[in-house]
Amino acid sequence: MNILSWNSCGLGMMRKRRRITKLITEYKIDICFLLETKLANCSTGFVSRIWNENHVSWFSNDAQGSKGGLLAMWKNTNFEVSNIEYGHGWIGLYGKHVHSDFHCFAIGIYAPCNDQDRQNFGMISFFLSTLLKFPG
């Protein structure tokens, strides 16, 4: 299973979106997390242009103003998502790799830069580590 996690620093430029599309194709990506998308909202059409294939599912955690934004995309013929968890700065996908029946929790995390947000992020990290130890 191939996973790509990329801090995109915004997806407004066509050149970046083409580069991501090329990476997804070239490395046969099954799950892709794009961090700091700076997108206020996302659409199926937008995701389809990035993934460039029919069998893609997605979930976004929208940006607040010009900060943040996460986009999780996965090839649904290779990875079946049974649960999505998310919070400020992270998206978690629980599912299984179809071909191997391997169950896992893949997480895309965008860590904050300022001290106060980092302290709050520490609580999120603790929550996630607890969740991973005791899957429900």
Image (tube, helix red, strand yellow):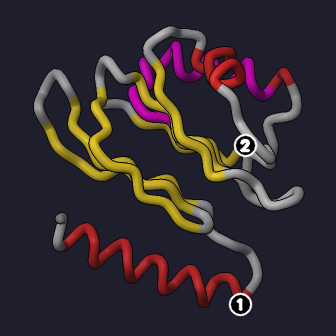
Q: Nearer the viewer, residue 82 or 2?
A: 82
Image vertical order of residue 101 relative to residue 28, above or below: below
Picture coordinates of residue 78 (x, y %)? 29, 22
Front residue of this view, candidates 37 and 24? 37
Residue found at x 52% / y 9%: 53
Residue drawn at x 61%, y 68% is 88
> Which picture quadrant has residue 1?
top left
Amino acid type at circle 2 is Ser
Above or below residue 103? Residue 85 is: below
Q: CA distance from mark 1 to mark 2?
A: 23 Å
Q: Residues within 10 Å of mark 2 (few under 14, many from 20)?
A: some
Question: Would you name the residue on which mark 1 appears?
Answer: 116
Q: Are marks 1 and 2 in contact (CB under 8 Å)?
A: no
For the residue labelled by badge 1, is the local secondary structure a helix, a strand or a loop?
helix
- In this picture, which residue range is highlighted in magenta? 16-32
What residue would you read off at disc 2?
8
